[in-house]
Amino acid sequence: MNIKPIIIVAMATTLLLPSRLVFAADPVITQEKDQIQTQKQVQGRQLMTEQERNEQRSKMRAATTAEEKAEIRKENQERMKQRAKEQGVTLINKRENKQQRKRLGSAHNINEFDQRQTLPLNQAQQAHVLSEMRSLLAGTQAIVAALATDDMDTVAKQARRLGMGMKKKPENKLHGILPKAFMMQGKAVHMAFDAIADDAESIKDPKHTLKQLGEALSLCKDCHEMYQIEVNNSNTGMGMDKRRMKFQQNRDLVK
């Protein structure tokens, strides 16, 4: 089975999260931005199960008029608002969020062209999050390579390493530092890879696995579209000194 090279390129682009280094943050700006992040935490799509997303797509495809599609979207939005309330999070209001960030950008020289929410981490925390992303990218590449030869045993093995048992998940050490919505998104990605491993072992269908992989990567894409990393040295977080952080980075490079 041949896998087009463009798939690998798309995966690489999806999993590499650009970061922005800011070492002297204005407390007033940081407070206002934190308020935006607290108020606008998740997209409705993040709260939906895979089955619900599939059903929503089917309904939209079956709709024949703009009015029908608008009604379907409205009904789903209302369900997600209720679900968000039950889970203690708030749905993102894209228009309001964009207006607020544009106002902050104009007033405080913040990049108004990048509307993503900021994850204010120190350098050690940033290294930890990016290390996990590199592991996800490497594991995804290994899965694609195995699919090219229909090696479903290797697919299952590599996917399992990226599942909920993954040792370097940021949530293991950064719980309470990363936003709840980010944690939920990360959990969904790891669960998706566990599902890939389960089905690779039982169904052993490369096409089915490719479909699952595409859905997992769509979760990654959503996360990259929502967040950016901002390094703030005043955030001590994990308390890792520079020497330990450098050792961790070097160890990651040789793995």
Image: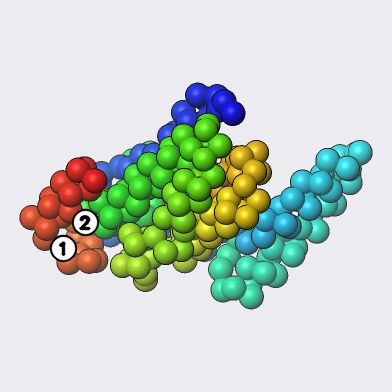
Q: Position of residue 135 (x, y in %)?
A: 35, 47
Residue 197 visible to the viewer: yes
Residue at x 64%, y 43% (from the top left corner): 205
Q: Which circle's residue, 1 or 2, is located before the other in the chain?
A: 2
Residue at x 39%, y 52% (from the top left corner): 118
SS at mark 2?
A: helix
Image quarter of residue 140: top left
Q: Nearer the viewer, residue 44 or 255?
A: 255
Tell me if mark 2 has few (under 14), some (14-19) or many (20+) residues whose alpha carbon lies within 10 angstroms of its own. Answer: many
Q: Position of residue 1 (x, y in %)?
A: 59, 28
Q: Nearer the viewer, residue 195 or 108?
A: 195
Q: Which mark is residue 142?
A: none
Look at the numbered discs 1 and 2 and tell me whether their residues touch, using CB distance below 8 Å. yes
SS at mark 1?
A: loop
Q: Which mark is residue 124?
A: 2
The amino acid marked with disc number 1 is Met
Q: Nearer the viewer, residue 173 or 222?
A: 173
Instruction: Give the farthest residue toward the right.
Output: 64
Q: Which residue is mark 1?
A: 240
In the picture provided, is 204 more to the left or to the right than 70?
left
Image quarter of residue 78: bottom right
Q: Please say if 38 is above or below 73.
A: below
Q: Please say if 136 is above or below 241.
A: above
The amino acid marked with disc number 2 is Ala
| Measured Cα–Cα span from mark 1 to mark 2 | 6 Å
Q: Please say if 98 is above or below 183.
A: above
Q: Position of residue 204 (x, y in %)?
A: 62, 47
Q: Position of residue 19 (x, y in %)?
A: 32, 42
